[in-house]
Amino acid sequence: MIESINMENIKDLKKKLYKIQCQNWIKSKIEGKGAIGETLELLLGKDRDNYSLPDYNGIEIKCKTLSNKYPLHLFCCTFDGRPLEMQRLLKIGGYPDKNNSEFNVFNITVYGSNKKLIRNHAYQLKVDYKRKRVKLVITYRNTNRLVTYMSWSFVELEMRLTNKLKYLVIVPGLKSKINNNIYFKYLNPTFYKLISFETFLNLVETGIISVTFKLSYYHSKERYGQFLDKGTSFDIYYYNIEKLFKKINVYM
């Protein structure tokens, strides 16, 4: 059941998105990756941010071009329990950067349904219902020794998921380049409501939801070579979205 105040917010957002659609092709207000989403947020009067809260009155907004084959980033969440865990993971599994072998990186996607093999290690997600944690299980291929202390608590994951993604709207769009300028055309949005945290855990177990690590180093002169965590994200492909969310019919 959708609370009346949330349905009013959804209807209000749909009206505003419709007005933006009526503008047809809109010149991008941002350069670089993510411009389609950030341009839409600016059109809605929202400032650029990185907060873990929903974008618009309790509703998370996700934009994608029709040609985008990448998964949807649900939320980012680092390991809990130890402050230097990500640096420790890079030390265990890092491999030389192809552009500069002096430094190691760790850029991989891990699933619960199968092991990911990288160099001398295998990585897999495990949902531990007894201890209420999602673990990253690392197996040393030569010895079968396990590392399982890197994990996310159910409490932290549920808070991230329900705070940010209780309600979601996906706005597809088209992209065109004219005279070195980028233009976007926003299409019909689809609204969703999160099914449950239990569903989320099941999708992690079955490999529908994955985790992507992006551990690297700074390239800037001031901090060159220092550890850089670009974000650890829980992701799902758009074609699986209705396994985690239920579609909402919105009538204006």
Image: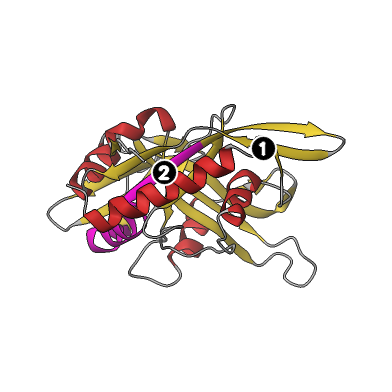
Q: Going 16% across and 58% down the picture, which residue do you hit?
A: 131
Label 1 crowding class (10 Å Cα cut-off): few <14, some 14-19, many 20+? many
| Of 87 and 92, the residue lying toward us | 87
The answer to whether the residue labelled 1 contacts the one labelled 2, judged by CB atoms less than 8 Å apart, is no
Labelled disc at residue 64: none
Quarter assignment of residue 56: bottom left
Residue at mark 1 to residue at mark 2: CA–CA distance = 18 Å
The residue carrying mark 1 is: 184
Q: Is residue 218 magenta?
A: no
Q: Going 41% across and 43% down the picture, which residue do you hit?
A: 169
Res 146 seen here: no
Labelled disc at residue 169: 2
Left or right placement of residue 210 versus residue 204 in this view:
right
Q: Is residue 27 above or below residue 6?
A: above
| Of 89 and 55, the residue lying toward us | 55
Q: Is residue 45 above or below residue 108?
A: below
Q: Is residue 174 above or below residue 36?
A: above
Q: Going 12% across and 54% down the picture, which residue do you hit?
A: 130
Region rendered in magenta: 150-171
For marks 1 and 2, the one nearer the N-term is 2
